[in-house]
Amino acid sequence: MTTQSKSQPESLSDLFFSFSRLATQGFGGVLAYMERELVERKGWLTREEFLGEWAVARTMPGPAALNLSIMVGARYFGIRGALAAMGGMFMFPSILIILLGIGYAKFGENPHVIGALHGMGAVAAALFIATGLKLLTALKSNPMGLVLCGVISIVTFVGIALFHWSVIDTMFTLGGIGCVITYFKLKARQ
Amino acid sequence: MSTSYPIVMQFIDWFDLFRQFLYYSIVSISGPLVLLPEMRNFLVNEHHWLTDAQFSASIVLAQAAPGPNILFVALMGWNVGLNAGSVFAALGAGVLCLVGILLPSSTIVFVTAGWVQRNSQLIAVRAFKLGMGPVVIALLIASGWTLATANTSAAHDWPLWVVTAATTLIVWRTKIPMLWLLAVGGILGASGILSVA
């Protein structure tokens, strides 16, 4: 089944600074940095565990990356851990955004600044796609099997990206089908 | 971001603003970005607390800044506060809106996460985590796709698409720090190479 990760955060400040670190780098969305920090660098979660936690975070109300930080913090240190992780996510970015706001008022119309933002936006989009591609490897151990996982992924992607289906409807319909199939596969294994 | 768009905020208005964001938090399944049209309607059209330009700038800036994108909500509050007259009000309103949009959803997530962890061996819990996998991965890739292609056209923006494709390969296959890639993207963009006339 899912492999267990070996290391875990040493302390609340370890949590706080890990989340600070990834959030302060996280241009255009922090998820790619979360995967790299929590899975590849710190090893607090295996890729399979990360995907499982992400599935919960993504289907709950609220910003998914922040939900994930709460879940990771709470897992080791309860409510103090959740607050430390959340604090880490906001502390430096909120200071930076005020400074950037002042700069944006002055230079927001500058064509070089607009160009730079477009270039960085193109990179940020790639970070999402690449993180998704990395997480695909976690499906290898999925009870549904690779073919079924592939079909669900492709239909979801095509529906959302090309046909602009409703995200919530798609997520709960196709995801729901996935959950039911997985449930019976797991049940049959027992 | 400073503009001359003076508004008057009574105590009851701050309360309304806070309550509205508490509501957005509860209904923000699949992320608060889907609520943007509702937020614009409330803040710009209905109450005239923000100009349309301030509303849009809040989103652009949060996307351009590092950190959780949800900070756009803090910026909306910040701008309402500035319009109401002071940097002090701006700071307070930024915190007010951010707390509003985070408090209910974070509480729900915290409670649910505890339950999920205590019951992680239940078949239903495992089935949920595993069964949602393919869909949430596809959603992630689709959001990257949408970010890369929104408001672009092949004729004008193919160099941006090349940057996205190349970066995807690099991040997927190597461990090159992502900040460097962002810096390269920014420099290429600033130089004007990426815009085809």
Image (cartoon, coloured by chain):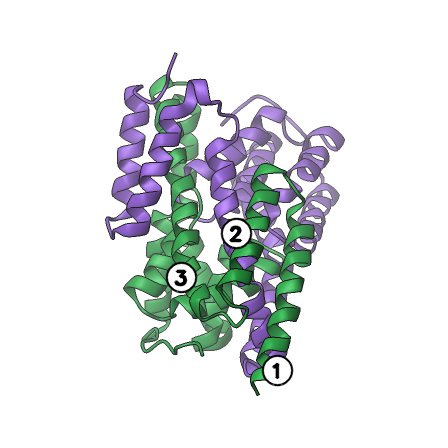
Q: Secondary structure at mark 2?
A: helix
Q: Secondary structure at mark 1?
A: helix
Point out the image quarter for the C terminus of chain A: bottom right
Disc 1 marks which amino acid? Answer: Lys
Q: CA distance from mark 2 to mark 1?
A: 26 Å
Name the residue carrying label 3.
A137
Residue A151, label in figure: none
Labels 3 and 2 share a subunit = no
Name the residue carrying label 1.
A187
Question: Residue visible at 39% across and 66% down?
Answer: A47
Q: Chain of mark 1?
A: A
Query: Who's purple, chain-wise?
Result: B
Q: CA distance from mark 1 to mark 3?
A: 24 Å
Query: At which x and y percent is residue B183?
Result: 27, 36
Query: At which x and y percent is residue A106?
Result: 40, 22
Residue nearest the observer in this picture, A74 or B93: A74
Name the residue carrying label 2.
B138
Q: Chain of mark 3?
A: A
Disc 3 marks which amino acid? Answer: Thr
Disc 2 marks which amino acid? Answer: Ala
